Amino acid sequence: MAVEVVAAKRKPLAKWKKVSLWILAVVVAIFIIVLISANFYLNRSLPEIEGEISLSGLSEPVTVVRDDMGVPHITAANNHDLFLAQGYIQAQDRLFQMDLSRRQASGQLSEVIGESAVKTDKYFRTLGLRRAAEASADRYTDLGMDALKAFAEGVNLYIAELRENGKWPIEFTILGYEPEDWTPADSLTIGKYMAFDLGGHWQSQAFRQYLLEEFPKEKAYDLFPEYPENAPYIIGKEKLDISKSFASAVIPHEFNGSNNWVVSGEKTESGKAILADDPHLGLATPSIWYQTHLETNEMNVSGVIFAGIPGIILGHNENVAWGVTNTGPDVQDLYIEKRNPENPTQFLYNDKWEEAEVISEPIKVKDGKTLDYEVTVTRHGPVISEFAADAGSDTVLSLQWTALQPSAELEAILNMNKAENWEQFEEALQQFETPAQNFVVADGEGNIAFKANGKIPIRKKGDGMLPVPGWTDEYGWKDYIPYDELPKTVNPNEGFISTANNKVISDDYPYHISHNWAQPYRQMRIQEVLRANDKLTAADMMDLQMDEKNLQAEEFVPQFVEVLSNVSDDRVDEVLTVLGDWDFYDKKAAAAPYIFNVWMTKIGNVLLADSIPEKTLELFSGKRAAIDQLLRRAFDGNPGPWIEEAGGLEEVLLTSLEQTLAQIEESEVKNMDKWEWGSFHQVRFNHPLSSVSPMNYLFNSKGGIPVGGSAVTVKASAFDEKGTVNHGGSWRFVIDMANPNEAYHLVGPGQSGHVKSNWYDNQFEDWADGTYHTTTLKQPSGEELILLPEGKK
């Protein structure tokens, strides 16, 4: 009986199992079908990179060979065909990025993203990057304008193909829109955006004004800039509501900068100059850079360009190699403007009310109404303090900025691409006005050279430290530093030139350049290594670009240890032991760099976070250098009010260390010796759509990779509060002029913006471990695409 009961009970169970297995099988089958379908859908939008394609507008066939890293080598019979092909090929790999870039710079993101982008659009409409780009067209000769038009023609040919076959990149499908045709103004607007990204310090002026309004003078001045003694060179009263006015401002990353250096043949094993460059910008998918090789009978040039622009901005040809870092000059001034209380479009100037220009900038919003938006432009520039605050205030801030003036950087780039020596290259640079950059150059004649190039204003009065009165002509710009008097050095006796956003030249220089310089540690380390070796090789330069020596730690750790050595606390003793045994390299497997780098951020928080609103603190672009400055003074026995009011140096170090340990211990084992910098400090090349789950699984499938280095090492890898390395060497480049036909490159995470491309993220790990690829000026082997004039296929 019992057996029968058991058997009876088992029958439903067996049936349930069968049904469950059947349901599971169906679910798995559906899942597999969905995956296959999704994969097919993604693959169908991959561009054609082999065979033949007919393109209207071409006069002769163009050959495009993609090498094993996906770098297109484009060979054409003439410039028009070359730039048309460059536009077409760039669009194949980066169309969504190109469209997003022009939209952000133009203030048109809301049209495809929605209401969440309105504040950003208002800000860029206020700045007027697109207005400046459109006004720049008249500065171009036929050389530049023909290149822009041909490039746009090529982009539009690819867009037309997609309209016909419907094989849009997946990002357009997700956002539910199709891009408009490309124009020359789009390329110029992206160029103006790069000038924005490399800054000009208006936010620093606003922040210093805030300090003077909110704190006693001594405390305010304690955070004003000061350059550390012996660090190396390369050669108002109106109340303003700063916190409210700029709460939604888009502020470029504090560490936007770079390393570059060039070494003469006297210090190299090959006997020829070696040049290295690694611009420090945001790390994302796709890369900000697009690597290309362009060849006609007029030029043969290889390197990188911003997606959406023709030519090569950084790289080399057969005779000249060049690289840049950000000079960081004070090329922006905030003017305090007095508005006529009875007429909001008039502002006081030399005792008269002057009519401002009011520009209508309607903003289309996806799934919403078009917003009426107006920008007020005074004689100095756009009123920027009202884009996020209430309009109508009697006192506002306007912005004067060199990048808002017409300029012709692309013309300079095209001439740089053809230069045969340093002299021709310097002549081409005259038209490269914004952003101001530190160019280092090596040529085939053995010259090495440096020039801090760009349009840098000479002020009638004032020095770019604070906002100045706009109601008088006393504080206007009277001129720019003459081109022939910009800082320059050629073939120095030391045998090398290096720059790392540090102070360009001594105070003996007759013109003001900037108050804002990067912390000097990268430059100090570069010079330390270059001075120590007279047989340098390209491999040495690649090693130096990946160098993780932390000279900030070398300066401060012994002093931290000394101050805290008498503190009776086991955990503090353990920290001091770990730091005391450190060799000051930010190795990913070490505990000391984890402690030190987080500690330095906590020191800043202890000193400033409770006194200054978070959004206002974002205006403080020199915060880290200022914290260094406060610590140096305190160690010298002169603690300023910020440290004194926080309880003194020992208290500041102890409190910030407690916060550091609390943060680290949330995610690490208790044994400090087991902590690893790389468990927190990880590079992630995030796609712009990956912030919306589950898009991160599609676009950021590799997650994070542990890396060494930090914001102050030559291997630049700045991190956010979550430890994500989101800023650093966006492109790494080394060339030995003994063989100018080849150069070594790294473009993380890869060449293509298409998620299913073999070159989408194939340089992700390479970026982390420093594995470079070689690109040649000669035709490589690879997948070949022939672009034919229409009707000749």
Image (spheres, grey):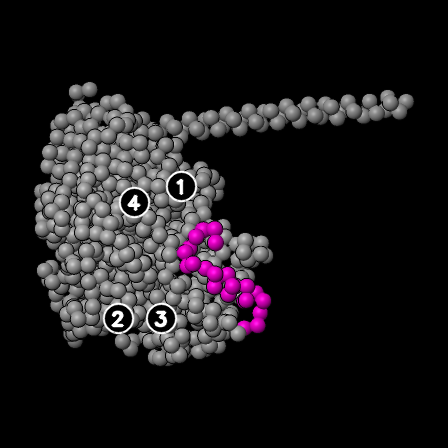
Q: CA distance from mark 1 to mark 4?
A: 19 Å
Q: Earlier in the sequence, mark 3 or mark 2?
A: 2
Q: Secondary structure at mark 4?
A: helix
Residue 765 — which label? 1
Picture layout, residue 570 above or below residue 305: below
Q: Secondary structure at mark 1?
A: helix
Q: CA distance from mark 4 to mark 2?
A: 42 Å
Quarter of the image that includes the C terminus: top left
Picture layout, residue 127 above or below residue 788: below
Q: Position of residue 146 (x, y in %)?
A: 12, 39
Q: Identify the amino acid type marked 2.
A: Met
Mark 3 or mark 2, which is nearer to you?
3
Q: Earlier in the sequence, mark 1 or mark 4?
A: 4
Mark 1 or mark 2, which is nearer to you?
1
Q: Residue at x 23, y 35 (%)?
A: 776
Q: CA distance from mark 1 to mark 2?
A: 42 Å
- Labels 3 and 1 touching (C-beta < 8 A): no
Residue 465 — which label? 2
Local packing at callout 2 (Cα closer than 10 Å; few below 14, some 14-19, many 20+) is: many
Q: Identify the amino acid type marked 4.
A: Ala
Residue named by callout 4: 539
Q: Residue at x 42, y 55 (%)?
A: 586
User: What's drawn in magenta, residue-wise?
Assistant: 567-590
Q: Earlier in the sequence, mark 4 or mark 3?
A: 4
Q: Identify the amino acid type marked 1.
A: Glu
